[in-house]
């Protein structure tokens, strides 16, 4: 019989103490892909130890890049000898975010081949906007069943591109493709997430000419080649938000270190609205969260940045299941991001959904149950619920959680949680 790991959680009172946030998964992945554009040595610091980062490193190595760890959070990368333009199908299956190597491969070699990234639990995850951008730059994309071939016979040429939706991945892919294209590219209705800004600052240090990252209009002036650099990945705003909510939900008092308040303004605003105390020490990238009474209800609508982040929706829903009163959540970014509702309901949460809207009736307390992580952030939400539930909670399919949260058990244990990783017979 195969074995599998589960998390076993028992409530153990308020979280107290200090937690250090790692580098952002959703910045490390596109920046690792962008290393394909570099012809000289690149050093990345603040790289989080995550399964998804390991997969992206495997993709780079498959393409011919040399990647080695200097220490557990620093990498040395040399992509001067890329020798293929085809990304391994099995890795694309493992992680659809690998698709952001397409832009860099196109930029450098005018061709890129891969398997269409599948959808996942939270939605179909189409790539039409990525392909629209590549085509606008002069590439031809052929999707043959599940294979994608993208070629630009005459190389890439700058163009104006309007994104029907401010897609994070499409914005990243188009920026990277445009860095070596001939002439100027303008992306309208671009994504404005901090991870876009981090990618642009990394590319600029390599010699790219990019203006407007963080706004809806990004202009890229193509250059001949990109060199090497050293860059520190920005802190993971979603990990920070997750620990802030866990602190508030357990009625605790936690110091969040390596967290940038301006990257999660809506989450901080909502925490204060429901009665938590949040104090930012901007100059030190520190945020204090405290809540010593039951929190109140609120209404949330997820939106592209700078709106409330969809990646914090599940965690905030978990908190609202034990807040006082009725709350409403509308998920506008992904079409199927309520799979945590059924699992939270097994723990006694009272949640009704209709389409992309959920109504949560706060209950006095949850009870432990056997639940399943359905995606990365849903898994985090279930761990949070387990921290306050009466009785034991066992969370399975925690490989989802390993993709985006490094040292979760150690960090929560350090804050006083009773949480263990146990291997059981599957
Ligand atoms: C990134 O995914 C993040 N992943 C996601 O985080 C995050 O939820 C998402 O951005 C939104 O903030 C990484 O950065 C690796 P999108 P991405 O393209 O780029 C539609 C997590 O938990 N769309 O902005 O795939 C799409 O269907 C993960 O860390 C198109 O229609 O997100 C979705 O409804 C989950 N056509 C919406 O846009 C396209 O060509 C947002 O997708 C592309 C996207």
Image (cartoon, rainbow, N blue to C red):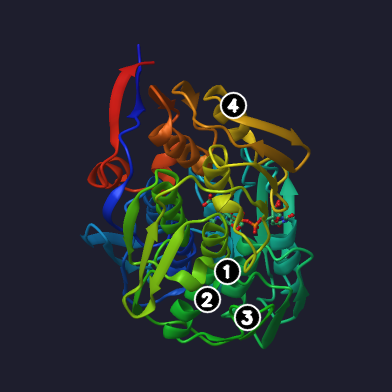
Q: Are marks 3 and 4 in contact (CB under 8 Å)?
A: no
Tell me how far mark 3 sits from mark 4, CA to CA: 51 Å
Q: Nearer the viewer, mark 2 or mark 4?
A: 4
Q: Nearer the viewer, mark 3 or mark 4?
A: 4
- Can residue 117 be seen by looking at this rendering? yes
Of the two numbered discs 3 and 4 on the same chain, state the one appearing first in sequence: 3
Of the two numbered discs 2 and 4 on the same chain, state the one appearing first in sequence: 2
Q: Quadrant of residue 75?
A: bottom left
Q: Are marks 1 and 4 in contact (CB under 8 Å)?
A: no
Of the two numbered discs 3 and 2 on the same chain, state the one appearing first in sequence: 3
Q: Which residue is mark 3?
A: 181
Q: Secondary structure at mark 1?
A: loop
Q: Secondary structure at mark 4?
A: helix
The picture quadrant for ligand 1 comes to bottom right
Q: Is residue 392 above or below residue 338?
A: above
Who is closer to the viewer here, 250 or 51? 250
Q: Are marks 3 and 1 in contact (CB under 8 Å)?
A: no
Label annotation for residue 193: 1
Label annotation for residue 359: none
Tell me how far mark 1 sits from mark 2, CA to CA: 7 Å
In the image, what residue occupies the spot 29% across and 40% down?
409
Q: Quadrant of the C terminus?
A: top left
Q: Secondary structure at mark 3?
A: loop
Q: Nearer the viewer, mark 3 or mark 1?
A: 1
Q: Are marks 1 and 2 in contact (CB under 8 Å)?
A: yes
Residue 413: horizontal and vertical position, in percent?
Answer: 25, 41
Of the two numbered discs 1 and 4 on the same chain, state the one appearing first in sequence: 1
Q: Quadrant of residue 122?
A: top right
Label annotation for residue 197: 2
Label annotation for residue 345: 4
């Amino acid at each position: 019989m195969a074995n599998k790991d589960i998390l076993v959680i028992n409530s153990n009172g308020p979280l107290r103490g200090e937690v250090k946030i790692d580098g952002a998964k959703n910045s490390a992945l596109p920046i690792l892909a962008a290393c394909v554009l570099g012809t000289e040595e690149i050093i990345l610091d603040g790289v989080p130890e995550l399964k998804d980062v390991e997969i992206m490193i495997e993709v780079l190595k498959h393409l011919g890049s040399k990647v080695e760890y200097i220490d557990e959070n620093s990498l040395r990368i040399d992509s001067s000898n890329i020798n293929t333009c085809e990304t391994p199908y099995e890795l694309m299956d493992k992680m659809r975010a690998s698709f952001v190597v397409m832009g860099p491969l196109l930029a450098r070699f005018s061709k890129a081949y891969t398997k269409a990234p599948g959808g996942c639990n939270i939605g179909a995850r189409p790539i039409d906007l990525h392909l629209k951008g590549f085509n606008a730059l002069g590439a031809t994309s052929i999707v043959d069943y599940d294979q994608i071939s993208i070629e630009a016979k005459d190389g890439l040429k700058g163009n104006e591109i309007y994104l029907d939706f401010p897609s994070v991945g499409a914005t990243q892919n188009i920026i990277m493709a445009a860095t070596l294209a001939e002439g100027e590219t303008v992306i309208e209705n671009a994504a404005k997430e901090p991870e876009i800004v981090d990618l642009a600052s990394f590319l600029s240090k390599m010699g790219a000419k990019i203006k407007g990252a963080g706004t809806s209009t990004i202009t890229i002036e193509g250059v001949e080649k990109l060199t090497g650099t050293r860059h520190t990945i920005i802190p993971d705003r979603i990990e920070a938000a997750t620990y802030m909510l866990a602190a508030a939900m357990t009625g605790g008092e936690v110091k969040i270190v390596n967290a940038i308040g301006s990257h999660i303004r809506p989450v901080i605003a909502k925490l204060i609205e429901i009665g938590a105390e949040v104090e930012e020490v901007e100059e030190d990238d520190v945020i204090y969260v405290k809540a010593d009474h039951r929190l109140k209800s609120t209404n949330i609508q997820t939106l592209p940045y700078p709106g409330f982040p969809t990646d914090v929706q599940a965690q905030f829903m978990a908190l609202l299941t034990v807040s006082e009163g009725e709350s409403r959540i509308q998920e506008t970014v992904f079409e199927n991001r309520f799979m945590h509702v059924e699992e939270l309901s097994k723990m006694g949460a009272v949640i009704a959904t209709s389409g992309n809207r959920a109504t949560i009736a706060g209950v006095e307390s949850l009870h432990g149950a056997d639940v399943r992580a359905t995606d990365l952030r849903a898994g985090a939400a279930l761990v949070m619920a387990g921290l306050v539930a009466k009785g034991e909670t066992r969370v399975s399919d925690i490989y989802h959680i390993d993709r985006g949260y490094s040292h979760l058990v150690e960090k929560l244990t350090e804050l006083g949680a009773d949480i263990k990783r146990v291997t059981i017979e599957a």
